[in-house]
Amino acid sequence: MIGIIICCCYKYYKNYELCYEKWKNIIVAYPFINFFFIFGTPGSTNYDENTHVLQLDVDDDYDSLPKKICKAYQFIMDNYPHIEGIFKTDDDIDFTNNCGLVLELVMALQNGDNYCGIFIDKTRPMKICTARLKKFNNLKSNIIYSHDGAIYCHGAGYYISKKSAMYICSNIEYVSYRHLEDVTIGYILNKYGIFPTQLYSECREIPRII
């Protein structure tokens, strides 16, 4: 079984609606895939198996994204132990061929891949660039916003195995207080000797709609 996490937020709810429409045929056609459209709802955790919306006890903003993703992994492992691999993407990512992506994820599961993604990158430890800082809602003047060095997959689309999810969740405190979800996931997995391999599905980022 495979889980697909699609990161959403209430500020851009229309993106979730458009995203759901693009995935609904896959939801019906592939019952071995569990979908989780994740939102932040402080003080509440709830999953609706009809709408596939997973509300997590975390702020619904970019600042809390690493914690949000980590809590989603933990929820899946605690409540859906039959899921052996998880693909994470965002509601503003449009895939050229959703069916092709699903087949690629099945192959990743069958091959025992622990970490693979569509865009693979490498970075050294450094301050977060100005363009990315603009996405944050609550910048604090007394904090130097930086990220770790890692070979990692961009957050637009990456797959992790159950083993990798366990490693990530065992470091939930560290992940929760870092600033960049995708780099931090790579950093944690690199520590355990896990490095990304390539997925070949194609995707593009679409505009946010308020």
Image (spheres, grey):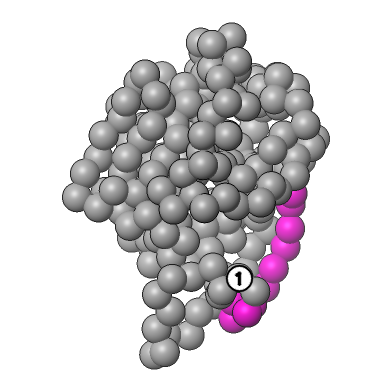
Residue at the location (54% across, 11% down)?
28
- Which residue bears the numbered disc 1? 132
What kind of element bears circle 1? helix
Residue at the location (71% across, 19% down)?
99
Q: Is residue 42 magenta?
A: no
Above or below, 160 against 12 in this view is: above
Residue at the location (57% across, 50% down)?
209
Q: Residue furthest front?
A: 210
Residue at the location (56% across, 75% down)?
133
One can see residue 35 in this view: yes
One can see residue 70 in this view: no
Above or below, 128 against 86 in this view is: below
Magenta residues span 119-130
Residue 168, percent across and down?
Answer: 44, 49
Front-lying residue, 91 or 114:
91
Residue 79, percent across and down?
Answer: 30, 27
Left/right of residue 90 with respect to residue 175 in the rendered view: right
Residue 160, percent across and down?
Answer: 56, 38
Amino acid at the residue labelled 1: Arg
Q: Is residue 120 magenta?
A: yes
Residue 76, percent across and down?
Answer: 37, 32
Front-lying residue, 121 or 9:
9
Front-lying residue, 82 or 19:
19
Front-lying residue, 105 or 96:
96
Left/right of residue 95 with respect to residue 140 in the rendered view: right
